Amino acid sequence: MCTIMAAGMGVGLAGSLMRGAAEQSQHEAAAQVDRVTAMQAQGAAADAVERGRTRELQETMAGARVLSGALVAGSGSGAVVGTGAGAASRRASEAVLEVSRKTIRINAALDAYGLREQARAHYQKAQDEIAAGKNAFVGTFLSGIATAAGQAGRVAADMPGRGEESSADTPDQQYRDDTLRLEH
């Protein structure tokens, strides 16, 4: 009887270990996905900054084309280019170009910041998944131990103690057993 009980408890504990290991593996896999997503977000943040630089250079070249075209048109008409309305127009165009370039830089920086924050959140989520996996493993294992201890306690409670007579040996139990036999 004790051997069967011990085998049952051993199988139960082994099952608890396997469930705990499976849960831990599941959390580790989720953590790996979060780490990969975080790395992708970091790469996208770097790309956002680089795209901003490229877009800023494109805007600078387009603005230079407009400014130089206006300069050529003004000088071709015989006007004095560096003074008066022509100079004011040029300064206004340069200011608009600078605002446009700053806007591009700021937007790129904001995109990169948002993507870095996403990466940080995914890294944190990965750490949380690892902790949850460890907790699941320990919790499942401890639950298995508690279940095995409960089974052992129930079996021990049903067993007669040393020096005690078995419930089947009491006169009341013998009377019930005899009555049941007569009825069948």
Image: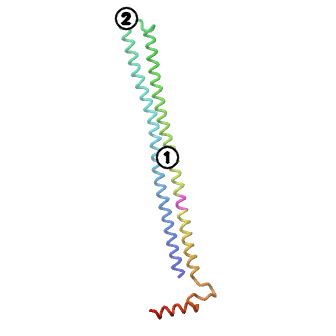
The picture places residue 19, in percent across and down from the top left corner, at 48, 64
Disc on res. 122: 1
* Residue identified by numbered label 2: 78
Query: What is the count of numbered marks?
Result: 2
Residue drawn 46% across the image and 54% down it? 29
Pick the front one: 114 or 48? 114
Disc 2: CA contacts within 10 A as few (<14), some (14-19) or many (>=20): few
Q: Secondary structure at mark 2?
A: loop
Precedes in sequence: disc 1 or disc 2? 2
Amino acid on which the number 1 mark rests in the picture: His
Which stretch did the figure color magenta? 134-138
Name the image quarter holding residue 135.
bottom right
Prevailing secondary structure class for the magenta stretch in the rendered image = helix
Q: Give yes or no for contact between labels 1 and 2 (Cβ–Cβ under 8 Å).
A: no
Q: Amino acid at mark 2?
A: Gly
Q: Would you say residue 49 sits in the magenta stretch?
A: no
